[in-house]
Amino acid sequence: MVNVDKIALVTGAASGIGWATACLLHDEGIHVIICDNSKDNLDSANTKISKENYQNMSSFYADVSLEADVVHLFNHIKKTFGRLDYLINNAGIDSFCDPQSFSISKYNHVMAVNVTSVFLAIREAIPLMRNAKEASIVNIGSIHGHLTTAGRSDYATSKTALIGATRSLSLDLATEKIRINMVSPGAIDTPMLLRGWKRKASNINPNEVRNRADAIHPCGRIGQPEDIANAVFFLLSKKASFINGVNLNVDGGIHSKVFLSTIWDDQ
């Protein structure tokens, strides 16, 4: 069994926000287990781990929407480390939905990845987190749980559900001395965001889309994965020891605007 001071699991961590979070936690002296269901992304992450000599980072292949994979993942953590201090439920998929061609199978998949996986991970994490002194969980939501656009009803539903789940779970987990909070990112410079832009604004130059996106944000720019990683680390830390059951919008202030224009419409 590996003996380390702090252990964190980050799901969906082979790229984007998950990878940035894993790197920050590693740099803070925490052993980080990254898991992902993309073998290509995981291979790329493992190459980075080896190249950068991240001795306190390990990887595990798992599809967290599948109960058997989640159980297997946590059995590995139990056998290898014996406990878990931090859980970051970052795994998620984007989705566009036309209500006139609604697909129940697609909807169920979005909910399985974005919501059900959180419940599965928390169920398996509780016994391992009982052995931690400062156990903490952070769920990664989205601005679409608060403000959204047309064609995103299934995705928005999943992220809105996470807000209620986090709030209620904070009461359940408090008896186990486990805090749980949530971060809702806005537009963050990740492959998922760029794929969404390409879908919605295929007729607009990508640089123009980026300029429009920067311009509508009060902070004057879209976010970087590190912006979310910093918020996650704060909520995990002792400095947030009296914060429980809250959602933190990290979106450059876009939620404060009365009118949210889409970046592919004429301004």
Image (tube, rainbow, N blue to C red):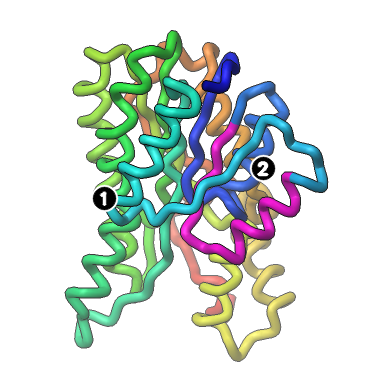
Label 2 close to label 1 by CB (< 8 Å): no
Q: Which residue is mark 2?
A: 226
Marks 2 and 1 sit apart, C-alpha to C-alpha, by 30 Å
Image location of residue 148, percent across then percent down: 37, 62
Between 62 and 236, the residue placed more toward the observer is 62
Question: Could you say which is closer to the camera, residue 62 or residue 167?
Answer: 62
Q: Position of residue 168 (x, y in %)?
A: 20, 31
| Residue pictured at 43% horizontal, 36% vertical | 76
Give x and y (percent) for residue 83.
Answer: 42, 21
The circle drawn on residue 215 is none
Q: Position of residue 20 (x, y in %)?
A: 65, 44
In the image, what residue type sits under mark 1? Glu
Can residue 40 be found in the magenta stretch?
A: yes
Quadrant showing the C terminus: bottom right
Q: Amino acid at mark 2?
A: Glu
The stretch of residues the image draws in magenta is: 32-49
* 84, above or below 52, in the image: above
Point out the tag, 2 or 1, that comes first from the N-terminus.
1
